[in-house]
């Protein structure tokens, strides 16, 4: 009870080719209650063929082109259609929602009263699977394609893809002008990623057609798209940057240059294309779709946000696809306004510089890292440096000269302020926080470079602006300036020089890294102020020499300290273990402090012998200080 | 035009400065040759340690044969180390032969302590500056005027071993197995025992190797012995390992210098059996201690061209011995002045060796660090260096 009985047709006309005529036997054997007549399909399609009015149902086993021709006849004469696909007509099988050439297709082909399905026409030609214009990304991909195949398609596309003008006109709307590499009408029986893209949204009974528009803005963008295809992370609800999507019942597609239209894999027409849906027009036996027909009207959908619009369209068409994406005008304008603002030296900038420097200086004397961090957050120096980077990148003289002046004034004020504070405070005091800002090395340059990248990136992205505080702390521009000022205040040029070297390292590193980051983010096609950029690079190269030497010193120190840990001394029969060593300079003297473990008491004679052994084994003159711990 | 001219001038100046980067002055050969003899253990063919020593000496000589005035040094040795014994010659007789025939300036001895001690006085009486390369027994230089040692002596070696075990491995119970036929082994064992007991350790057994059996090992194991000190030959060490394996006992095992070098030469297929063993030695394979002084780089190049063997600690000793003798001869205008050469050898000057500094004191004994190593993958991994 409750089970629906399957109703079959009483009479069916089997249309076949010479190769598929044998299928008649299958049909006859399936049911003896059905009258099966057969006809050669070419004869049926001939102009002079007269259809028997008693025939209401056709069963076709032929090529796609022949099937489509029969479909036209079926539409004209309101006939129902059953299809027996070959083994190799997998797409057709998908269209019918069945597996090709098994008993289900036989049963399906002879059933009656199946749901009529939408038909899509493009320039009056039936579209069963897809209709494409231009170059669709990974167009030749099929379901089950491996990563290697997809990657090969990607490489082949790269060489050929160009964007050209496309105009999409939907009923009752203004034409949408954009630039794209191509577009494709996709049905649920399409193959490859296009199918998985629309599978959640498309329905053969909703009276709508689905159009995908592909427009890679850069090679990197296309790579990202490829990655998402490989991972299966694409859907119409979450379109990759390179795709646009339109769902509508009727659409006109015009192109700036004539494009061939491929319908179901065959060249069939040329643009302009008029694409329409005939809702539930064709009575064709398909396996019941899991998706129910939608109740009520289905909304149109236009999602072309990822595609170039307005003035970007003409720009996109003029050039080959760049490696990195270009920033849009809008993003550009927002950022530029911000950077110009940052480049200005106004009262609040100067005041903040003074306050942050004085705070940092006091923090250095207090040896308080939290006070110093507070000063770092307060300092406004990062902003004009980032502006300067953009100015160099785009050769915007007003931007970089303004930024340079602002930075210079900031530096001067910082030095004076900290020198002044230092002159009030104890001269001899050198705290650990101060020492940490002396002896910069290549590691500090690495910090500056990463900070510069982060600064440029957070600046260019509104959502990430809050991250700038972290960058400011990491790179710490004001504390080394403060230490340099302290050195000035004490008239200690060595002190000043080392700290200023650290500041310069940060400054140059940020400028360079931020410029390159802005370049990669697409804020310029190239580094325009090449001369200025070269000066920055040369400055960096010059700074790198003392930084490298300093870094080498650090490495040597660490190695030496590690090496000392393996040293032992047998002095007058007494075994001495070196546990820890610290090396430092006291004026011109190299001092080594060591912690020694010993079992026995060491006499002066033993200590002298130890000193001799240490001096003999060391590569330099050392002043030795030893702390003895006895092993009990 | 002006820019090109300036660039050309800069290039010219640079070319003029370049030769100044080369500090080495070319020495004009004087045409005179002076000989240094090498005397090995006298076993035919590849005989282990002395072969390595000879290779080191020959490579060093090939790299650096010239003295400052252009005189040349050559190494005279018996090709293939044909047995001196076979021709009925002792070491002293061999040296005498070299003195007469080749008018040698010095001798490098690649013989063991046992061999050397048997003829020590006769060798010393010859009055030829002699450097014992691999002999480490302290009696080698005791009351010897012309015999010096370039290796550390066994006193320091055993003391270092005992103190390391006690103070750094913090082990309290040790057993010593020594070879009573080998004076080095007995001496090392004795010093180890004395030192270990002095610092609160206990020696569970002090036995001759020939007494080694399963019941002895079982007894030691039951007593909770933590370390076996085995200053034995390679063959005997392998035997100890085998016995330990039978008993399924894995105590710490420590041996003495030359073990790895011998195994590399004579039993290379058994190298892996030494893994996990501690040894005291003259060197380590630790790169951070490799000075790579210019002379080392130069000699390494020659060694690789001349020999296919992998260099061992004995090879390095050979290099250092040659360097020391060359230094001494160089300072003596009369290249045959034995007194002068001997004094220079024993001048207590600090020499830069391959991996550490060393000096020879006036008593002929070497001051150089003892490397305590752990053998891993056929390499001496440095644990500590005892000065």
Image (spheres, coloured by chain):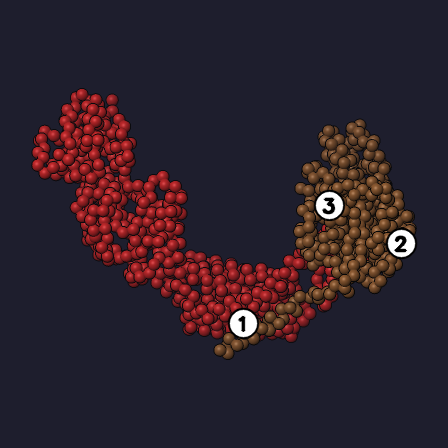
Mark 2 residue crowding within 10 angstroms, few (<14) / some (14–19) / many (20+): some
Q: Nearer the viewer, residue B226 or B33?
A: B33
User: Could you say whether the residue bearing mark 1 is in a helix, strand or loop?
Assistant: helix
Measured as percent of width and height from the top left, residue A81 is found at 18, 33
Q: The residue marked by circle 2 belongs to what chain?
A: B
Q: Nearer the viewer, mark 3 or mark 2?
A: 2
* Circles 3 and 1: CB atoms closer than 8 Å: no
Q: Nearer the viewer, residue B178 or A91?
A: B178
A606 with respect to A550 (left or right): right
Measured as percent of width and height from the top left, residue A548 is found at 60, 63
- The total of numbered circles placed on residues is 3
> Which tag, 3 or 2, sits closer to the chain's start?
2
Residue under numbered circle 1: A411
B78 with respect to B145 (left or right): left
Task: Indicate the quadrant where residue A204 lies.
Answer: top left
A114 with respect to A420 (left or right): left
User: Could you say whether the residue bearing mark 2 is in a helix, strand or loop?
Assistant: loop
Measured as percent of width and height from the top left, residue A470 is found at 51, 58
A348 with respect to B60 (left or right): left
Question: What's the residue at 54%, 66% (across, down)?
Answer: A540
Q: Nearer the viewer, residue A350 or B68?
A: B68
Q: CA distance from mark 3 to mark 2?
A: 37 Å
Q: Are marks 3 and 2 on the same chain?
A: yes
Q: Nearer the viewer, mark 2 or mark 1?
A: 2
Please tell me the colour of chain B: brown
Question: What's the residue at 72%, 42% (across, down)?
Answer: B265
Q: CA distance from mark 2 to mark 1?
A: 78 Å
Q: Which mark is residue B127?
A: 2
Mark 3 residue crowding within 10 angstroms, few (<14) / some (14–19) / many (20+): many
In the image as oriented, which residue stretches furthest toward the bottom? B2
Residue under numbered circle 3: B373
């Amino acid at each position: 009870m409750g089970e629906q009985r399957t109703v079959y047709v009483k009479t069916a006309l089997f249309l076949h080719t010479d190769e598929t005529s044998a299928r008649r036997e299958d049909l006859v054997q399936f049911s003896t209650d059905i009258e099966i007549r057969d006809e050669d399909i070419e004869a049926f399609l001939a102009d002079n063929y007269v259809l028997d009015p008693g025939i209401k149902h056709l069963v076709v086993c032929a090529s796609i082109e022949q099937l489509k021709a029969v479909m036209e006849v079926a539409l004209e004469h309101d006939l129902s259609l059953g299809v027996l696909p070959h083994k190799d007509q997998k797409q057709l099988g998908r269209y019918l929602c069945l597996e090709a050439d098994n008993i289900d297709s036989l049963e399906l082909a002879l059933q009656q009263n199946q749901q009529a399905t939408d038909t899509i026409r493009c320039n009056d030609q039936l579209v069963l699977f897809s209709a494409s214009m231009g170059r669709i990304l990974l167009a030749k991909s099929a379901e089950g394609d491996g990563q290697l195949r997809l990657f090969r398609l990607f490489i082949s596309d790269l060489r050929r893809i160009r964007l050209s003008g496309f105009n999409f006109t939907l009923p009752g709307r203004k034409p949408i002008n954009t630039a794209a590499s191509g577009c494709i009408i996709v049905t649920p029986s399409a193959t490859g990623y296009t199918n998985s893209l629309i599978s959640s949204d498309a329905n053969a009974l909703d009276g709508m057609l689905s159009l995908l528009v592909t427009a890679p803005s850069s090679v990197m963008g296309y790579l990202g798209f490829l990655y998402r295809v490989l991972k299966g992370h694409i859907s119409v609800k979450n379109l990759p940057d390179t795709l646009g999507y339109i769902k509508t019942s009727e659409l006109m597609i015009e192109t700036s240059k004539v494009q061939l239209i491929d319908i179901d894999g065959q060249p069939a027409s040329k643009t302009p294309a008029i694409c329409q849906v005939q809702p539930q027009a064709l009575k064709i036996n398909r396996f019941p779709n899991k998706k129910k027909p939608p109740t009520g009207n289905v909304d149109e959908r236009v999602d072309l946000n990822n595609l170039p619009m307005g003035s970007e369209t003409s720009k996109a068409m003029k050039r080959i696809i760049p490696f990195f994406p270009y920033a849009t005008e809008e993003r550009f304008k927002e950022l530029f306004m911000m950077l110009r603002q940052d480049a200005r030296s106004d009262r609040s900038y100067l005041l903040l510089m003074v306050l942050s420097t004085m705070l940092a200086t006091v923090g250095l004397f207090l040896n308080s890292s939290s006070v110093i961090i507070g000063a770092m957050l307060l300092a406004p120096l990062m902003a004009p440096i980032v502006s300067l980077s953009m100015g160099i990148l785009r050769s915007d003289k007003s931007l970089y000269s303004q930024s340079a002046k602002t930075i210079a004034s900031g530096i001067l004020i910082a030095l004076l302020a900290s020198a002044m504070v230092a002159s009030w405070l104890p001269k001899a005091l050198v705290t650990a926080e101060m020492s940490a800002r002396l002896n910069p090395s290549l590691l500090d340059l690495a910090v500056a470079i990463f900070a510069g990248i982060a600064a440029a990136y957070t600046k260019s992205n509104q959502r990430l602006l809050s991250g700038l505080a972290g960058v400011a702390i990491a790179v710490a521009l004001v504390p080394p300036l403060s230490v340099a000022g302290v050195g000035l205040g004490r008239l200690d040029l060595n002190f000043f020089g080392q700290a200023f070297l650290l500041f310069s390292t940060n400054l140059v590193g940020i400028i360079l890294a931020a410029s390159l980051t802005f370049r990669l983010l697409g804020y310029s096609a190239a580094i325009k102020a090449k001369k200025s950029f070269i000066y920055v690079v040369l400055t960096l190269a010059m700074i790198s020499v003392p930084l490298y030497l300093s870094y080498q010193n650090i490495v040597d120190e660490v190695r030496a300290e590690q090496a000392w840990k393996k040293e032992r001394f047998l002095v007058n029969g007494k075994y001495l273990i070196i546990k820890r060593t610290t090396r430092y300079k006291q004026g011109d003297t190299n001092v080594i402090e060591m912690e020694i473990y010993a079992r026995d008491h060491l006499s002066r004679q033993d200590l002298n012998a130890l000193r001799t052994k240490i001096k003999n084994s060391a590569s330099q003159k050392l002043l030795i200080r030893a702390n003895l711990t006895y092993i009990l | 035009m002006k820019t090109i001219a300036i660039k050309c001038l800069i290039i010219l100046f640079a070319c003029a400065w370049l030769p100044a980067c080369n500090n080495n002055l070319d020495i004009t050969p004087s045409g005179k040759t002076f000989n240094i003899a090498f005397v090995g253990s006298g076993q035919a063919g590849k005989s282990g340690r002395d072969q390595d020593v000879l290779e080191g000496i020959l490579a060093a000589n090939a790299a650096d044969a010239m003295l400052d005035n252009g005189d040349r040094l050559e190494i005279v040795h018996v090709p293939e180390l044909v047995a001196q014994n076979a021709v009925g010659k002792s070491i002293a007789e061999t040296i005498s032969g070299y003195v007469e025939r080749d008018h040698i300036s010095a001798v490098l001895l690649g013989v063991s302590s046992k061999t050397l001690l048997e003829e020590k006085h006769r060798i010393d009486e010859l009055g030829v500056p002699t450097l014992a390369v691999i002999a480490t027994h302290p009696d080698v230089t005791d009351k010897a005027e012309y015999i010096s040692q370039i290796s550390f002596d066994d006193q320091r070696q055993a003391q270092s071993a005992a103190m390391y075990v006690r103070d750094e491995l913090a082990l309290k119970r040790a057993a010593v197995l020594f070879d009573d036929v080998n004076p080095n082994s007995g001496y090392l064992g004795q010093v180890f025992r004395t030192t270990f007991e002095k610092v609160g350790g206990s020696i569970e057994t002090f036995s001759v190797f020939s007494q080694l059996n399963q019941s002895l090992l079982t007894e030691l194991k039951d007593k909770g012995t933590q370390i076996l000190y085995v200053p034995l030959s390679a063959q005997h060490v392998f035997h100890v390992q085998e016995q330990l394996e039978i008993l399924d006992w894995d105590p710490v095992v420590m041996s003495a210098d030359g073990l790895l070098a011998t195994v590399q030469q004579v039993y290379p297929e058994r190298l892996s059996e030494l893994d996990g063993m501690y040894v005291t030695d003259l060197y380590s394979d630790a790169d951070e201690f490799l000075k790579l002084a210019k002379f080392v780089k130069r000699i390494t190049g020659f060694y690789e061209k001349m020999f296919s063997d992998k260099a061992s600690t004995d090879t390095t000793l050979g290099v250092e011995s040659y360097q020391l003798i060359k230094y001494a001869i160089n300072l003596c205008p009369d290249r045959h002045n034995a007194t002068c050469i001997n004094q220079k050898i024993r001048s207590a000057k600090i020499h830069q060796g391959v991996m550490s500094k060393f000096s020879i004191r006036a008593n002929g004994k070497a001051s150089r660090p003892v490397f305590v190593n752990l053998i891993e993958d056929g390499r001496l991994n440095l644990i500590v260096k005892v000065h």
